[in-house]
Amino acid sequence: AQSVSQHNHHVILSEAASLELGCNYSYGGTVNLFWYVQYPGQHLQLLLKYFSGDPLVKGIKGFEAEFIKSKFSFNLRKPSVQWSDTAEYFCAVNSGGGADGLTFGKGTHLIIQP
Amino acid sequence: NAGVMQNPRHLVRRRGQEARLRCSPMKGHSHVYWYRQLPEEGLKFMVYLQKENIIDESGMPKERFSAEFPKEGPSILRIQQVVRGDSAAYFCASSRLGDEQFFGPGTRLTVL
């Protein structure tokens, strides 16, 4: 069975600080990896995804993530955060061709202080 | 292009009643997924459906829960004889080719 671990449940940063949110997964086969974001009062939106190819993936709003297969990790990064990045961030994984249901981490609540 | 629609957004039921949650996928999407989010927990996969077929229901509780996605109309998640532990946010997602999933706003079920 798959599992996803997000290391930090709550993160508080100041604007312009750099961000890295950890995500590790447990699964022995081929995986597809995702980061979703949920802004206050809104529904989940896809930030970025990795299926294959270049392990450094660029997403929307300046976010990127790096797939490190040997570490079973898919950490999310942003060089300079903004107040509008305050949200809940979820790492997720599924297997195969990508059609399977997603296994989510518990989420990281990110607060950016102006 | 309208996103994934879910209704109702909020649903209150008393113990023992039935809850019906509806999900209309995005136009052109034939894959539907249901997830449940309990307080302080991440989203948990429940069931994956394509038109008229259940593809994977490995996350569905064995009793009282059922899902369908008929040829016409929305997907329905049905919970019979609700209990307090069913109180949660239920999210629906859809995809066109079974890859990127687009999520709806969720239905918040409260069982009194």
Image (spheres, helix red, strand yellow):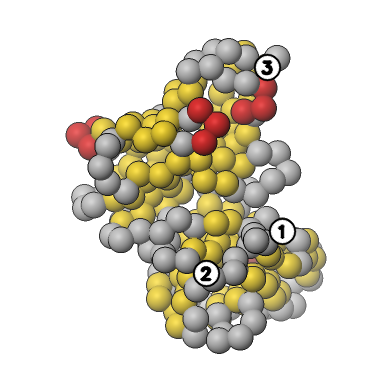
Q: Amino acid at mark 2?
A: His
The residue carrying pointer 3 sits among few (fewer than 14), some (14 to 19) or many (20 or more) residues within 10 Å by Cα, namely some
Residue B94, given in percent of the width and then of the height, sits at 53, 64
Compared with residue B62, is residue A54 higher up or lower down, i.e. above or below? above
Q: Nearer the viewer, mark 1 or mark 3?
A: 3
Residue A43, given in percent of the width and then of the height, sits at 65, 49
- Numbered circle sitting on residue B29: 2
Q: Amino acid at mark 3?
A: Gln
Q: Nearer the viewer, mark 2 or mark 1?
A: 2
Which sits earlier in the primary sequence, circle 2 or circle 1? 2
The residue carrying pointer 2 sits among few (fewer than 14), some (14 to 19) or many (20 or more) residues within 10 Å by Cα, namely some
Residue B6, given in percent of the width and then of the height, sits at 69, 65
Real-space CA distance between mark 3 and mark 2, rounded to the nearest whole angstrom: 39 Å
Residue at figure coordinates x 46%, y 36% from the top left: A59
How many labels sit on residues? 3
Residue at figure coordinates x 45%, y 56% from the top left: B100
Which residue carries the number 1 mark? B108
Secondary structure of the residue carrying numbered label 2: loop
Residue sitting farthest toward the front: B1
Q: Nearer the viewer, mark 3 or mark 2?
A: 2
Residue at figure coordinates x 67%, y 55% from the top left: B105
Please, which chain is the residue tagged with disc 2 on? B
Quarter of the image where one finds residue B24: bottom right
Which residue carries the number 3 mark? A113
Tell me if residue A93 can be seen: yes
Secondary structure of the residue carrying numbered label 3: strand
Direction from residue B91 to residue A50 in the image, left or right: left
